[in-house]
Image (cartoon, helix red, strand yellow):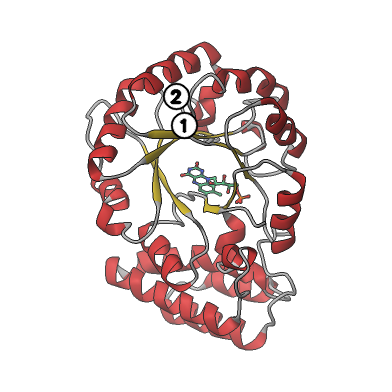
Amino acid sequence: MALPVYFAPLEGVTDATFRRVHKAVFGGPTKYFIPFVSPTQNLAFTSRELSAIAPEHNAGLFAVPQILTKNADHFLWAANALYDMGYSEVNLNCGCPSGTVTAKGKGAGMLADVPALERFLGEIFARAPLAVSIKTRIGFTSPAEFERLLPILSRYPVHELIIHPRTRGQFYTGTPHRDVYAAALRETRLPLVYNGDLFTLSDCRAAETAFSGTRALMLGRGLIANPALARQYAGGEGLTVPELRRFMAELQDAYLAAHPRNVALGRMREVAKHVVCCFESPDKPRKAIRKASSLPAFEDAMQRLFDEHELREEPGFAAEG
Ligand SMILES: Cc1cc2nc3c(=O)[nH]c(=O)nc-3n(C[C@H](O)[C@H](O)[C@H](O)COP(=O)(O)O)c2cc1C
């Protein structure tokens, strides 16, 4: 039985426009996670954050906002505001590896100060008005840290624990520590979600088999590269070039309706950078997409990609080089 698939949050890619058009054209994921909002002592969302989380921008899909903070009061303020907007779940970010984030003890930085993490969790789980899930890495410097972290996390009513089994030091490179995830399945009663390097249909099926007892799979880059992947894994149709053309055209129209042309171009290039991985011989079109400094140049590069290149047998994300 295929597991539910969640769309991972990718700041700068899976914004409200992307989520809406993806859901309309392909569907598949049962939840779409919104890239993090970062509440501060001002206790107000920025206009950019408000636009990302506005319920009317997330209508028709199960969206889960994500909060990045190490301050329990700031977390609870944001959780209450999101609850008042109608959300039923929020996600805590314990995974962001960015140096500017971890230097402040946030994101994956929370894993480096375990006593502070325990105090934080105690406060938020005592007072949160809605379900709280957590997206975490397995340690700051070493995968062995998870042996200490998991029992602590397991003391709280975590709605779902999404594990990206890399350390902060690995960023998104190297191999995920799948053995640490498998051990966690044996050692906790929390519902677990696996995230990391599920790039193709075979990867999803292999994870389903290897990780018995898993609640769901979370996909990021694989689902941006092949936006039909969740649907196909659930038993639906696989990706076709005409459908991908339509998706990219609808996405571009939606970006142009919401943003200036240069912003729309930037967003489209970011998506296309992933999509190009689905095709045979992607080096030339990848270069053309990267170089496209105007929308007509970008459209030309995409047209050539669609006209002149075949989809790979198992379309999905592939790391470059
Ligand atoms: C550009 C970029 C932005 C990301 N933004 C977020 C984010 O806002 N919140 C988060 O929890 N993870 C974020 N991530 C991590 C992804 O959600 C996901 O965990 C990661 O891509 C690994 O999953 P994948 O191998 O399926 O892509 C980001 C990753 C990338 C590459």
Q: Quadrant where the C terminus lies?
A: bottom right
Indicate whether 42 appears above or below 120.
below
Residue at (29% x, 33% y) in the render: 78
Q: How many marks?
A: 2
Q: Which mark is residue 104?
A: 2
Q: Quadrant of residue 38?
A: top left
Q: State the residue in front, 80 or 114.
A: 80
Indicate whether 47 appears above or below 233.
above
Q: Is residue 258 left or right of residue 309?
A: left
Q: Quadrant where the N terminus lies?
A: bottom right
Confirm or deny contact between disc 2 and disc 1 (CB under 8 A).
Answer: yes
Q: Amino acid at mark 1?
A: Val
Q: Secondary structure at mark 2?
A: loop
Tell me the distance, in whole angstroms, between the alpha carbons under discs 2 and 1.
6 Å
One can see residue 232 in this view: yes
Q: Amino acid at mark 2?
A: Lys
Residue at (42% x, 61% y) in the render: 19
Q: Is residue 59 left or right of residue 286?
A: left
> Residue 218 at x, y = what percent?
58, 49
> Residue 53 at x, y = what percent?
31, 49
Indicate whether 193 appears above or below 126.
below
Q: Which mark is residue 48?
A: none
Residue at (68% x, 50% y) in the render: 197
> Residue 34 at x, y = what percent?
41, 48
Residue occupied by mark 1:
101
Q: Secondary structure at mark 1?
A: helix
